[in-house]
Amino acid sequence: MSTSQRSTAAPRRGGLGPVALAALGAWAMAVPYLGPPIGLTLEVPAGVEFADHVVPGLFVAAASLPFIVLERSGRVEGLLSLTMAGLAFLAGFWMVATHVPLLLEALAGVTGWAPTVWHAHPGAANSLLALWLLVAPTGPRPEMPG
């Protein structure tokens, strides 16, 4: 198979995106527990940490696994991959939405910016990558001229 044939048959959605999304889901679960050892602490009850990080991180990771299988089998254009990307986006949005009060506290000077950014960044990263996987075009890539 020639290089031009290979590049035109490759789907745009997928690639390393689902693997990165699974890693971001795992990272989202770990962030609140890795912050204290490096001095980025917040006074947040354990139940809130679980609801704001672990539950949505599990949803992101779980949604990524079928997406990875579909990508490896070359079937990323289907409804299942869109559904998985959509679920991962909703879980990432959940993380963003639950951290708005924390961001407002940082703006008011109640909470420091370093722990706030450390604590809130996984939601934005998960949301952006899942959104890209959700709206990225699929199908053959245009051939490169030349």
Image (spheres, helix red, strand yellow):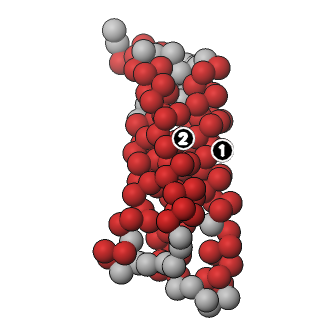
> Alpha carbon of mark 2 to alpha carbon of mark 1: how far?
9 Å
- Looking at the picture, tell me which residue is in the foreground, 62 or 86: 62
Provide residue 23's location: percent of width, then percent of height: 40, 45
Tag 2: residue type?
A: Phe
Disc 2 and disc 1 in contact, CB within 8 angstroms: yes
Question: As displayed, is residue 142 above or below residue 97?
Answer: above
Locate the N terminus by quadrant. top left
Question: As displayed, is residue 89 above or below residue 144?
Answer: below
Task: Tell me where residue 51 sits by quadrant.
Answer: bottom right
Q: Which residue is mark 1?
A: 90
Provide residue 118's location: percent of width, then percent of height: 46, 70
Provide residue 99's location: percent of width, then percent of height: 63, 66
Q: Which residue is mark 2?
A: 59
- Is residue 17 visible to the viewer in this orientation of the structure? no
Q: Secondary structure at mark 1?
A: helix
Tag 1: residue type?
A: Leu
